[in-house]
């Protein structure tokens, strides 16, 4: 078997594992957010595409038309993700052009003449680049003030991934890259999946993705150089293949490791906290909450941190509610109590806040932006606030 074909098949198998693992992880969530549902569909489709490409390359099964059919839908997935991240529809012309292109190339994948495959691949590459460019313009031109800080970080990360993925995807087209050492479209799929997982973490942004990418590329480059040193007769193309496969393997393992860590974190509910903490009062209880992995990202804002934010007005908002979210406060009237709380949350970079004490005011807050499970954090903070308010500040004192 041709080494380039074999290496590309292995690369696609790694991409299929990462993408399908992400899709299955999201599928098991009973309360997915709309954006998570979009990522689940896109990751599942990309995983299926990569799996078919792996079978085609490693077994020689005649799956080219099915592969082309799924590829035709990939630009539509890019637009679907962008709309979900922006929380608004794309311009009508962009949407219609993308839908028409996806439908046309899907039909051509099924019914094209055999001799037309090469020029159709070139035409599809142009269509893919046009959609990516249009989505990039939409992401860059977003109304930043209408989105939370976490949502802006998510969109910035997606924009970076599109910039990196576009040239990698083009290596899959013979009209553009006739005989590369390895075709890297599967690496583009892994980047999209890893970005979706990484951006689900609080405070994750484009710079974090860039650092991760640099480490993975460095690992692959080092692996390729070591392969050349261990096998002096190895060709440069073989060293490139080894480096790319090592990088892809590292990204796939990072995807699965981060998914496992997120699943384990979600399984640690409030009721696992010891009764001893409850008996020692609110401060001891909150200290133990912050010490658990499930609440490692939780931040407390006490009287000193809230001194310049009109704490009396904010405390009044929490008299009849347990949790406030940036989405709830997005349309707060200027100068209102809700606007004061929204400004505080934006400045602190958090999306969810709960008052664990009303006098003096103490807020427990977290950044649950991106793809994080917003509903789960709302429920956790509500339970936390209800328990904390019922406790005395210290053992032997009265509660709020």
Image (tube, rainbow, N blue to C red):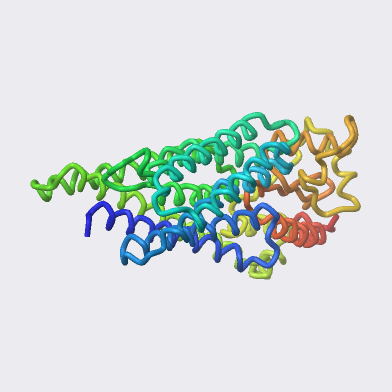
The part of the image, by quadrant, that contains residue 214 is top left
Q: Is residue 212 visible?
A: no
Q: Position of residue 334 (x, y in %)?
A: 88, 30
- Residue displayed at 60% across by 42% down: 154
- Residue displayed at 30% across by 48% down: 182
Tag count in the figure? 0
188 with respect to 308 (left or right): left
324 with respect to 366 (left or right): right
Is the residue 53 above or below the residue 126 in the image?
below
The part of the image, by quadrant, that contains residue 79 is top right
33 with respect to 337 (left or right): left
151 with respect to 261 (left or right): right
Is the residue 18 above or below the residue 357 in the image?
below
Q: Is residue 398 visible?
A: yes
Query: Which residue is situated farthest in the left direction here?
Result: 233
- Residue displayed at 62% across by 51% down: 371
Can you say which quadrant of the picture contains the N terminus?
bottom left
Q: Position of residue 333 (x, y in %)?
A: 89, 34
Foreground of the two, 260 or 65: 65
Q: Position of residue 86 (x, y in %)?
A: 69, 41
The part of the image, by quadrant, that contains residue 62 is bottom left
Foreground of the two, 333 or 121: 121
- Residue displayed at 42% across by 38% down: 167
Foreground of the two, 220 or 48: 48
Can you say which quadrant of the picture contains the C terminus?
bottom right
Is the residue 248 above or below the residue 337 in the image?
below
Foreground of the two, 245 or 394: 245
Q: Position of residue 157 (x, y in %)?
A: 55, 39
């Amino acid at each position: 078997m041709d080494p380039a074909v074999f290496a590309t098949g292995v690369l696609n198998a790694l991409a299929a594992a990462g993408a399908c693992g992400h899709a299955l992880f999201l599928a098991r969530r009973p309360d997915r957010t709309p954006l998570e549902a979009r990522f689940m569909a896109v990751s599942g489709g990309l995983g299926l595409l990569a799996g078919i490409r792996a079978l085609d390359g490693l077994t020689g099964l005649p799956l080219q038309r099915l592969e082309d059919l799924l590829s035709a839908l990939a630009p539509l997935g890019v637009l679907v993700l962008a709309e979900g991240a922006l929380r608004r529809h794309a311009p009508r012309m962009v949407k219609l052009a993308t839908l028409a292109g996806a439908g046309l190339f899907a039909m051509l994948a099924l019914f094209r003449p055999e001799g037309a495959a090469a020029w159709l691949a070139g035409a599809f590459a142009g269509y893919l680049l046009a959609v990516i460019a249009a989505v990039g313009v939409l992401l860059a031109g977003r109304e930043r003030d209408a989105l939370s800080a976490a949502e802006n970080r998510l969109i910035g990360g997606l924009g970076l991934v599109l910039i990196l993925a576009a040239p990698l995807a083009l290596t899959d087209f013979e009209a553009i890259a006739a005989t590369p050492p390895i075709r890297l479209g599967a690496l583009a799929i892994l980047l999209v999946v890893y970005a979706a997982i990484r951006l689900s973490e609080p405070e994750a942004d484009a710079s974090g993705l860039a650092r991760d990418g640099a480490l993975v590329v460095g690992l692959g480059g080092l692996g390729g150089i070591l392969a050349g040193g261990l096998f002096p007769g190895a060709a440069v193309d073989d060293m490139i293949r080894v480096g790319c496969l090592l990088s892809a393997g590292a990204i796939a393992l990072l995807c699965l490791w981060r998914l496992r860590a997120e699943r384990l974190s979600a399984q640690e509910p409030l009721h696992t906290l010891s009764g001893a903490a409850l008996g020692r009062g609110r401060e001891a209880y909150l200290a133990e909450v912050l010490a658990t992995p499930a609440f490692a990202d939780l931040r407390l804002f006490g009287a000193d941190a809230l001194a310049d934010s009109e704490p009396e007005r904010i405390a009044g908002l929490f008299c009849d509610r347990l949790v406030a979210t940036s989405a709830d406060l997005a349309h707060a009237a200027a100068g209102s109590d809700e606007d004061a709380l929204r400004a505080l949350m934006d400045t602190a970079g958090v999306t969810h806040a709960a008052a664990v004490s009303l006098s003096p005011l103490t807020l427990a807050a977290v950044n649950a932006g991106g793809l994080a499970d917003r509903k789960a954090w709302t429920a956790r903070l509500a339970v936390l606030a209800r328990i904390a308010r019922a406790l005395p500040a210290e053992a032997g004192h009265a509660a709020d």
